[in-house]
Amino acid sequence: MSLITFAYLIGGLVLLVVGAEALVRGAARLASRFGIPPLIIGLTVVAFGTSAPETAVSVQASLGGSGDIAVGNVIGSNIANILLILGLSALIAPLVVSRQLIRLDVPVMIGAGLLCYALAWNGSISRLDGALLLISLIGYTLFLVAASKREKAPAGDDEFATEFGPDESDKPFAWVFQLLLILLGLGLLVGGSNLLIEGAVGLARALGLSELVIGLTVVAVGTSMPELATSVLAVIKGERDIAVGNVVGSCIFNLLLVLGAGAAVAPGGLSISPNAQSFDFPVMLAVFVACLPIFFSGYCIRRWEGLLFFAYYVAYTLYLVMFATGLGAIDLLRDAMLWFAFPLTAVTLLVIFLRAWRHQR
């Protein structure tokens, strides 16, 4: 690995951490000032900001004719958001899940995934399909804003009240500083992601990986670093609504905004490779559906569930690398996942769901 590649990787990580801190702090203070529930901030402002790298990469890839990178970036980022980011965040501290996520946002995430899969069924996502995804995003965002105005959380329930109290909100023009902090955080996140991707893609291509695998792994993880940094810092600071809401909201924005914008600007739309259509899309949908019973079980993501998510992400990434390099052990890994890990996990999720359902009754 060359010195410039190493500098890109380290510099990108530093900018991501600093940018995530600024973004979380600014968003939390805005939530406290205007009485907007922190979950709504995580699902909109923070999710939109941390999806900016994915948007930039996918639009640039679409314009440049690299549709596999654009599509792989979206699918891979969503898989990384759930399995890697939520998994690591839950390993740090169990995550409390809002009821709104179960009743509205996770079903919307699953619905958006099914919509994208249906649009991609014929092997491409056209410009008209991209416009439909963008319109769906506008409707979802307007609904969230309207819902937040109807159901404002009491001050005593605001999980940011301790760190960002009323005195901070009462300062004149404090919102201007908070907005600038958010903008600074977004700028650092985008710049850091670009540096990280520049170094990581150069390294991956030196190893001879395909564009789809690069999009699903290196680019996906690189553009998901803002979500990872933001969620981990939010968990450490005790701001768990932003941690979970940021991940779910980012998945929705990735599908509706990133994929929609990429398809809208691509000449002739985005082509979907057979591998993405037959394997990666279904894996993403399965990961989305797996969230429901885990989130529903006591409205909490426990450490062992986070470990399960993380282990599956390692296995998924290992499978992609083996597939790309043609290693013979891929058949053994596929059979182990298909005939042991997946059935065991399905039974576990079913038991969790039934116990939670009985407890709710």
Image (cartoon, rainbow, N blue to C red):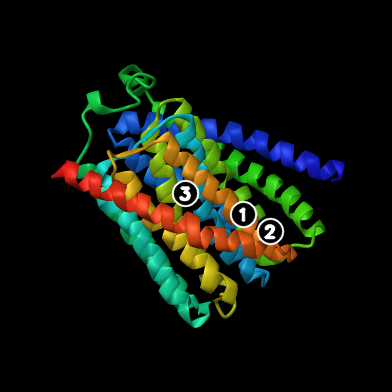
Q: Going by the image, does 349 lie left or right of 276?
A: left
What residue is rendered at 68% in x and 58% in y? 321
Gap between marks 1 and 2 measured at Cα: 6 Å
Q: Secondary structure at mark 3?
A: helix
Q: Secondary structure at mark 2?
A: helix
Q: Going by the image, does 124 lie left or right of 328?
A: left
What residue is rendered at 40% in x and 49% in y? 248
What residue is rendered at 41% in x and 67% in y? 133
Q: Secondary structure at mark 1?
A: helix
Q: Position of residue 251 (x, y in %)?
A: 45, 54
Q: Position of residue 199 (x, y in %)?
A: 75, 48
Gap between marks 3 and 1 measured at Cα: 14 Å
Residue designated by label 1: 317
Residue placed furthest toward the right: 2
Q: Position of residue 308 (x, y in %)?
A: 48, 44
| Residue in front for this viewpoint, 261 or 169 | 261
Residue designated by label 2: 321
Q: Amino acid at mark 3?
A: Ile
Q: Amino acid at mark 1?
A: Thr
User: Which numbered dot is residue 82?
Assistant: 3
Q: Going by the image, does 308 lie left or right of 59?
A: left
Looking at the rendering, in which quadrant would you find the C terminus? Answer: top left
Q: Height in image: 66 above or below 293?
A: below
> Is there a contact, CB below 8 Å, between mark 3 and mark 1?
no
> Is there a contact, CB below 8 Å, between mark 1 and mark 2?
yes
Q: Residues within 10 Å of mark 2 (few under 14, many from 20)?
A: some
| Residue in front for this viewpoint, 126 or 299 | 299
Asked whether residue 54 is in view, the answer is yes
